Image: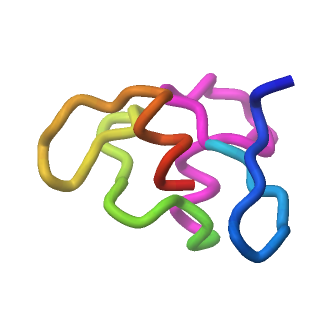
Amino acid sequence: MGKKEKSSKGKVRKLPKTKCCVSKKRCDRCPIRMLKEGTLPEGYTVKKRELVRVDGKKVTKKRLQKVA
């Protein structure tokens, strides 16, 4: 329902999960996979299998939707 958001270009982008589920095949929203592909939103990175912000602030789904 509210998992995908349209960007200004009209594309549908998937939001990354806040924590990796450690599945062997890597799900579509895995933050590790998105980081490797370069589809992770700007200002975010992955540390210890968790999605973190580069500036050190807390990651919330509301902020993540605004950036993505």
Q: Position of residue 1 (x, y in %)?
A: 86, 23
Rendered location of residue 15, percent (x, y): 65, 43
| Front residue of this view, candidates 22 and 11 | 11
Instruction: Answer with the quarter of the image where residue 7 lies.
Output: bottom right
In this view, the residue in front, 19 or 5, is 5
Q: Is residue 24 above or below residue 36?
A: above
How many marks can you see?
Answer: 0
When asked about the image quadrant of residue 3, the answer is: top right
Residue at image coords 50%, 47%: 66
Q: How is the image coloured?
A: rainbow
Residue 33 falls inside the magenta stretch: yes
Report if residue 64 lies within the magenta region. no
**Residue visible at 39% across and 32% down in the picture:** 50
Left or right? Give the position of 10 relative to 5.
right
* Position of the C terminus by quadrant: bottom right
User: What residue is rendered at 47% in x and 30% in y?
Assistant: 62
In depth, the one of 52 and 9 nearer the eye is 9
Vertically, is 14 above or below 49? below
- Residue 11 in the image, given as x and y percentages of width and height: 83, 67
Indicate the position of residue 6 as horizontal and vertical percent values.
77, 55
Q: Residue at x 63, y 54 (%)?
A: 33
What's drawn in magenta, residue-wise? 16-36
